[in-house]
Amino acid sequence: MSSENGPDQGGAQDAPPEQLALIRETVRKAKTPRAKPRTWRGAALAKELPVARVLVDKGVLHLDRYFDYAVPEELDADAQPGVRVRVRFGAGRHRVRDGRREGGGLIDGFLVERLAESDYAGPLAALAQVVSPERILDEELLGLVRAVADRYAGSVADVLQLAVPPRNARAEKRASPQPLPAPPVPGPGPWARYEQGAAFVAALASGGAPRAVWNALPGPRWPEELARAVAATLASGRGALAVLPDGRAVARADAALTALLGEGRHAVLTADAGPEKRYAQWLAVRRGAIRAVIGTRAAMFAPVRDLGLVALWDDGDDSHSEPHAPQPHAREVLLLRAAQDRCAFLLGGWSCTVEAAQLVETGWARPLVATREQVRDAAPLVRTVGDHDLARDEAARAARLPTLAWQAVREGLRHGPVLVQVPRRGYVPRMACAACRTPARCRHCSGPLEGQESASALRCGWCGREEGAWHCPECGAFRLRAQIVGARRTAEELGRAFPAVPVRTSGREHVLDTVSEAPALVVSTPGAEPVAEGGYAAALLLDGWAMLGRPDLRAGEDALRRWLAAAALVRPHSAGGTVVAVAEPTLRPVQALVRWDPVGHALRELAERAELGFPPVSRMAAVSGPPEAVTGFLGAVELPPEAEVLGPVPLPVTAAGRPRRVGAPPPGEHWDRALVRVPPGSGAALAGALKAAQAARTARGSDTAVWVRIDPPDIG
C-alpha cells in the first residue's frame, strides 16, 4: 500500500509535493470569477459586438423603445438577433457593482440586434439568459409589428404578444418537416364563373401581385375558390396566407385545401389547436417548411416565407377585430402586409363592406364579380314582408309570423331543412321615425338621437347636443318610435306550430357546423347558421328591425351582410330556394338583398359617408374613461389642427353581472366617451398625438384608466 492511500496519512503538510501542487492549482481556479446566470458579475463580455439591443416585454407606452444590455461571453454564440432572452429590468443607477448594473426583476424580451457599442453612457446590465437559440423575430416581422403599433397608437410589445405565440419547449425541440416542391398550376375551376376569375388565378400562378375585392356567388363553393387561389400562389414558388372569421370557416377551407393539394402543404393556426400544436405549426411556417397558412385572426401575423398572397374572408365579421390592445383589425394588418411585401391581396365575402368598396373606388384594388346572369342563377328568390303587410295579416298579429312566412316554411319542409334566422337579444333601442323608420340623427354631427327618461327633448349620443324640434328628413314626419329589440321565443312558437318536425337551434351556447338534408327547422342567431347538405329549401329572416335599428353607423351594412350570409346557404331559385325577409321593403339594405347587390349598397354608403365625413373616408378615434380623466386627456393632447372633437358624452353604465364589452366601463362606474375625427391623410398624425399623450400619462404614473382606440367598430 502506498503512502498516498495509507491509514497513517497526515494533513496537507505531510502530503507529497504532487498532491500539494494539485491543491494549489484548484485554489487558483476557484479564485477566477465564474459566470452567474442571474447577474453575470465579473464575467467576461463577448469579444465582438458586446452590446445587445433588446425589446423588453413591457406594454406600457412610455417604455416603447429598445434597451441596451451587455452580452456575456458564455452567451455569445446563442445571443443572436431574433432569439428570446430574459433580462433584468428596473435597476437604478445607484445599483452598480464592478461596472455592471444589477438588480431589477427578470422579464422576457427579444434580442433585436447586436452592436459594437451603446449610445447609452451609463453602465449596462448583462443579459440574464438566452431562453432559446431559436430565432423567432426577424426584420420583416418586426417591421410589420412596428407598423401595426404606429397605426393603432399602441406599443410594439403588445403587438408582439399577438404576433408570436407562447413558447413550447417540446414543440421547439422537434424538427419541422421537409418542405415539399411547388404543386402544379391549378385550373380556374369555379373561378371561371367570374368575369376576371380565370385571369386572377393565372396572374397568381405566374408570380404576379393582383389586388382584388371578391364578391362571392351564393352557394358552398367559396372554400374551393379560395383554395385554388392559394394553390396558384404556391405553384409560383411563393407563400400564401388566408385569414377567416371562425373555426367553422377554417375547417371548410382546410378541407378544400387538403382535397386540392393533399396533406402537409398548409398549416392551420387557430386557438383551438392547443399551445404545443399551434406553436409547432407556427415554427414550421417560420422555418420555411410550410408555405401556406390558414387560420383565424391570430394568423394575420404568420411569418410566411416569400409571401405572395394575403387573403381575408368576410372582413365585416366582428371576429376579425382583435379585442386585446392595441385592437388591430385583420383587414388593416393584411393591407399593411400587402404593401410591405408587395404581394397579391384578396378580400372576399358574400357581402361588401364600405372599406372594400373604398379600395375599389380609389383604384387600389380591382373588382372580382360575376355577371348578373350568374348571380340570378345562383341566388334564391327573396321576398319581403313590410309593416303594411303585417298590419293586414291576422296571422302575423296573433303569432308574430306573417302568412307568407308560414307558407314558405310549410312548402320548404316538403323538400328539406328550413333556416330561421333570429336576431340576438340585447340591442339597445334608439329613436326612429314612426312613419318610415329612418333612424333619428343629430343635425350637427349626424350622431344617433336618444330619448331621455326625464325630458321631452332628444339628445345626441355623440356630441351631447339636445334636439327639441326634430323632423324626419326623408318623409317630413315629426313622430318618433323606439326601435324593435330582439326576438321572442321563436323556437318554441315554431315547435308548437310544426309538432311533427324536429327543431334544432344554433347559437352562442351551442353552434352547429352542419345539418342533414332531412326536413327540419333550424333556428339560428346571425353568424351561427350551420351548412345544410344540399342547401336549405327555404329561409326566414325575422325581425329585420332588430338589426336595422341598432345604434350604430354600420347597422344597415351589417344587417345586409348577415342576411346575405344566411341566404347564401339556400338553394338557387331554379331549385326552389326561397328567402322571406320580415323588413320594410323600401329600405336600402332590404332592396340590396332582394336584388342581391351588396356592391351597389356599399358604394352608396361610401358616397354618403364621404359627404358627412364618416369613416372610412375620415379617420376616427374614441377616448373613453372617467369624466375628469377624459377631460384632462383631451386638454393635454396636441391634436392635429384639422381634428374635430365630438363630445364627450356619457356611456351606458355596465350592469353588475353582465358581460363587459371591450372598452366599456367597469360595472357600476360612470364613464364618458369623446370621438376625435380627422380628414384623409391625417390618420398617422392623430395616432401619433394620442400615443404621445397616453405615454405621458403612464410615465407620470396616473392610476386612472383612459382607453384610446383607433377606428372603433361601434361609434353609434
Image (cartoon, rainbow, N blue to C red):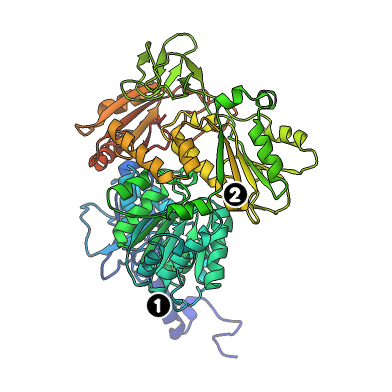
- The residue that appears at 60% across and 25% down in the rendered structure is 390
In the displayed structure, 700 sits above or below 470; it is below
Q: Residues within 10 Å of mark 1 (few under 14, many from 20)?
A: few
User: Label 2: few (<14), some or many (≥20) within 10 Å?
Assistant: many
Q: Element under label 2?
A: loop
Q: Which residue is mark 1?
A: 25
Residue 101 is marked as none
Determine whether the residue tagged by mark 1 lies in a helix, strand or loop: helix
Residue nearest the viewer, comparing 630 with 579: 579
**Residue furthest top as drawn:** 455
The label shown at residue 570 is: 2
> Residue at horizontal 46%, vertical 14%?
479
Q: Amino acid at mark 2?
A: Val
Q: Quadrant of residue 31?
A: bottom left
Closer-to-camera residue (176/439): 439
Instruction: Say how many tags the image has.
Output: 2
Quadrant hosting residue 229: bottom left
Tell me residue 645's x, y (percent): 29, 27
Q: Earlier in the sequence, mark 1 or mark 2?
A: 1
Q: Going by the image, does 70 lie left or right of 420?
A: left
Q: Is residue 495 left or right of residue 641?
A: right
Foreground mark, 1 or 2?
Answer: 2
Image position, residue 302 (x, y; %): 43, 60
Amino acid tagged 1: Glu
